[in-house]
Amino acid sequence: MSGAKLPEEVYKIAEDIKTMRIRGAGRIARAAAKALMIAAEKYQGPRSIDAFREYMEAAASLLKSTRPTAVSLPNAVNYVMRAIREREYETVEDAISAIIKRAESFIEYSKKATQRIGEIGSRLLQNGDRVLTHCNSSAALSVIIEAWRRGKDLEVYATETRPKFQGHITVTKLSEAGLTVTLVPDSSVRYLMKKLDKVVVGADTVTANGAVINKIGTSQIALAAKEHNVNFFVAAESIKFSPHTVIGELVKIEERSPLEVVPQDYLDRNPGIVIRNPAFDVTPPEYIDAIITELGVIPPQASIMILVEEYRREIRDELLRATSDIEE
Ligand code: RUB
């Protein structure tokens, strides 16, 4: 054990992700990359590469443990950590700058990818469209806001997104950008669907078979959209695609505290009532018309192509890991 302690800022970012002060799969990923950068910059431990690696791996595990569902988090951490997992360095200083460089390039790529999704996805919206979005997704908002900037007059509906009300962030962002927006209860979606033209949502994880894991309630919206022949689009950067799912690994759905649903005194008064608070759900590919990525628009069934293109090495490692378990 190198013994070097992680800087306070790293614990703070980890805590902010856990408690959702930093939230949304893209922002979580960038915050994790930034935390690794800070950890590297502030390293005060022994000047041995092994000690530095051990210290950075501790930071990586801490960050990965904060929230379980968005694959953008481990993807970001693994992308940055590859700087020291796969290369040898003469000095700790060289290893530190390699981490910083990779973290910076990840953050820059991720921001540009969200912008590019807006440019690509804006073409899927038409003048006069009534568009519904759910929760608060930077990628989905990038599509809607870019379409509006390009002169398309849109009527936007946003769900409240109980229990954490991320829909309020969405309506504020849209109205600050100049759009007219209507906030609606989550339970009104099927009633309203007949008046809508398109749905655009984000993703926390996209699996190898094209299923999309996003904020709880997304799959109900997709179901209602299918019923009413309303296009259902997902906006997701390639960092949301999960290499683990290529070997059939299931995505863990986060269960959050009942206190996000009811106050403590309700729990105290009703000890016999169980409260569940699953934070995400799975929308099967059959309910999704297209996934808008920074690399282009794909049918969900083509998700494996993004994975093979972008995560070849991770997939190889996953397959090796899976078969070595069998051989043991
Ligand atoms: C956020 C959520 C968002 C995705 C995509 O959930 O489900 O739709 O993370 O967001 P939470 P983005 O609020 O629990 O983090 O496009 O910004 O990455």
Image: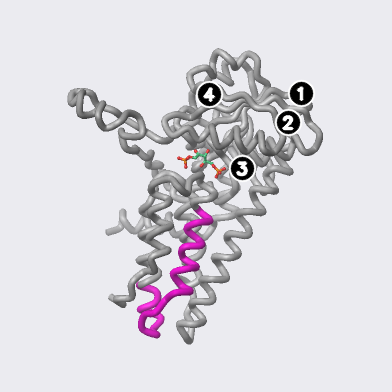
For label 3, the crowd category at 10 Å Cα-Cα, with few meaning under 14, some 14 to 19 and many 20 or more, is many
Q: CA distance from mark 2 to mark 1?
A: 9 Å
Q: Is residue 25 above or below residue 40?
A: above
**Label placed on residue 128:** 1
- Amino acid beneath label 1: Gly
Report x, y in % for residue 319: 43, 55
Q: CA distance from mark 2 to mark 3?
A: 14 Å
* Residue 108, label in figure: none
Q: In the orientation shown, which residue stands out farthest toward the right?
A: 151
Foreground: 248 or 149?
A: 149
Instruction: Tell me, yes or no, whether the two marked residues, 2 and 3, touch with CB atoms within 8 Å.
Output: no
Residue 297: quarter of image = top right
Residue 221 - label: 4
Placement of 109 over or under 291, stated as above or below: below
Of the two numbered discs 4 and 1 on the same chain, state the one appearing first in sequence.
Answer: 1
Is the magenta region chiefly helix, strand or loop?
helix
Quarter the N terminus occupies: bottom left
> How far separated are the C-alphas under marks 4 and 1?
21 Å
The region drawn magenta spans 29-54
Q: Is residue 71 above or below residue 123?
A: below
Q: Looking at numbered disc 4 in the image, what kind of residue is underneath it?
A: Ile
Proximity of marks 4 and 3: CB atoms separated by less than 8 Å: no
On whether ligand 1 comes within 8 Å of the CB at mark 3, the answer is yes
Residue depicted at x 51% and y 28%: 160
Residue 18 lies in the magenta stretch: no
